[in-house]
Amino acid sequence: MANVVVVGAQWGDEGKGKIVDWLSERADVIARFQGGHNAGHTLVIDGKVYKLAALPSGVVRGGKLSVIGNGVVLDPWHLVKEIASIQEQGVDISPENLMIAENTPLILPIHGELDRAREEAASKGTKIGTTGRGIGPAYEDKVGRRSVRVADLADETTLIARVDRALQHHNPLRKGLGIATVDRDELIQQLKDIAPSILQYAAPVWKVLSEKRKAGKRILFEGAQGALLDIDFGTYPFVTSSNVIAGQAATGVGMGPGAIDYVLGIVKAYTTRVGEGPFPAELQDADGQRLGERGHEFGTNTGRQRRCGWFDAVLVRQTCATSGVNGISFTKLDVLDGFETLKICVGYELDGKELDYLPTAADQQARCKPIYEEMPGWSESTEGARSWNDLPANAVKYVRRVEELIGCPVAMLSTSPEREDTILVTDPFED
């Protein structure tokens, strides 16, 4: 039985929600291994739409265990609201089917306030483009060894000590940014009030997953965002605050690297990005606007409009290497229907030299100019196609050319938001 990691292989928003849901039907356990509630997943099941942020995608499937791993930073107040919202849609969520790792760091109100204050204070060109939800500051506290973690909610003495340690750092910082210092007692009371709602799900996730693996259960590791936002291998500093690439899946839930059998990279048929940062293949013309409108390119949680561009094979080849991708799931092919000519970025021109990778230095990334290869488009519709025979010849040629350029085979092809509209080439759980 294979255990599968799903990672976004671009800047996020690749359509992971549908693919994770499609795979979760075959899995026994679905585990979130990084990120926070800044990345949303939209699932469409039997015409019903579910919008998730903190919860693993498996919660909408009966008989599955969903896990929030220690690699996640968790806003407990948001989680309680999200659980209530999903329950109102008829989904059963209980400690029987949802577990939170006891060593998961919490996002506190002070983190969101700091996040927003920093963005507001940043000068033009230095803004990161965060969602302002406290993800980055929460990860900073984790590394700085001043987090309040799930397990700390169970003991008042420990909780107070953790809050005091955090405020030793945050209050001087807030003064420097012109923010009022934190009411210590109020924050402690807020945490005590929310504690019972969170602690009912707390568990030694590493132990539970070890037992599940020994029992031969299938585990699906679910990430948020995309590999180009990875803190180490993304377009730094315009990245998220955690490791997004597949190697984090093991660390983020407390398992060894041997637990990963297959890595599935989710790849959109064109490229999008939210927020600031370099984007060599970005289009600021009618084609870019058309891609955005046809693809409904607005963030699930933030509503922010995404920047759009042609498919960048250089970037995807790079992320397939850093995540050890075995196969890709190609999504939103139908958005390209009707384009007379399509372009694929196959390299960059930087200061008169041609590159086959994105350089690390931010100033060089910003100066990279795309080198395009053109391909004929197709006028027929690919929406809802469920076999290769349903696709126009030029659409098949486009997919095959992408495979060649990124050096990785297509395992799945998605042709609409509906989970049934999927062409399966390789089942990652059976590969």
Image (tube, rainbow, N blue to C red):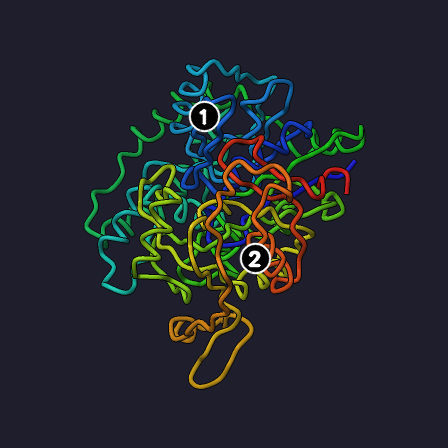
On residue 278, the disc is none
Q: Which residue is mark 2?
A: 398
How many neighbours does mark 2 have within 10 angstroms: few (below 14), some (14-19), or many (20 or more)? some
Task: Residue 100 in the image: state x and y as whole percent.
Answer: 56, 29
Q: Assign the N terminus to one quadrant of the image.
A: top right
Q: Which amino acid does the dot numbered 2 rest on?
A: Tyr
Vertical placement of residue 369 versus 115, above or below: below
**Where residue 395 sits in the image (x, y, percent)?**
55, 52
Q: Residue at x 43, y 29 (%)?
A: 51
Depth check, mark 1 against mark 2: the one in front is 2
- Residue 156 image label: 1
Closer to the camera in the image, 364 or 124: 364
Q: Nearer the viewer, residue 190 or 278?
A: 278
Expressed as whole percent of the image width and height from the top left, the position of residue 166 reads 39, 43
- Horizontal relation, residue 310 to residue 115: left or right: right
Residue 102 visible from this viewpoint: no
